[in-house]
Amino acid sequence: MKPGLYKVETIDKRTALLTPLNKQDDQFTFPVSNFTHDVAKGDVVEVWREGTKWKTKYCEEETKSISSHTKDFIKRIMDKE
């Protein structure tokens, strides 16, 4: 897996299938527990490596799902309280 933007294609109980936005022929699995937000099918996430750990960031401007925007907004509100 390389750092970059990925689209979440499917999610099972513990892993998400990611497809890079720049190349559609590669696919990677990523642990759902390692995402920094409540990930949903169709989300676009940025993935990069810091030391030995992979980090993720929800890309609001790239994601077209209303439910994902709502989940992310609620999570940010709860985190601030």
Image (cartoon, helix red, strand yellow):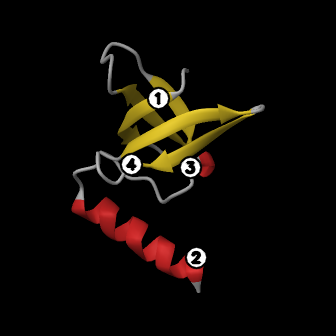
Mark on residue 59? 4
- Quick check: can you spot residue 36? yes
Mark 2–mark 4 CB contact (< 8 Å): no
Mark on residue 4? 1
Residue ID for mark 2: 79
| C-alpha distance separating marks 4 and 3 | 12 Å
The amino acid sitting under disc 4 is Cys
Whichever of callouts 2 and 4 sits on the residue coming sooner in the sequence is 4
The amino acid sitting under disc 2 is Asp
> Is label 4 in a helix, a strand or a loop?
loop
Quarter of the picture containing the N terminus is: top right
Give x and y (percent) for residue 16: 47, 39
**In screen coordinates, is 20 left or right of 42?**
right
The crowding category of the residue bearing disc 1, from other C-alpha atoms within 10 Å (few below 14, some 14 to 19, many at least 20), is some
Mark on residue 35? 3
**In screen coordinates, is 79 left or right of 39?**
right
| C-alpha distance separating marks 1 and 3 | 14 Å
The crowding category of the residue bearing disc 3, from other C-alpha atoms within 10 Å (few below 14, some 14 to 19, many at least 20), is some
Which residue is at a point 40% across and 33% down the rendered structure image?
Answer: 6
| C-alpha distance separating marks 2 and 4 | 18 Å
Whichever of callouts 1 and 3 sits on the residue coming sooner in the sequence is 1
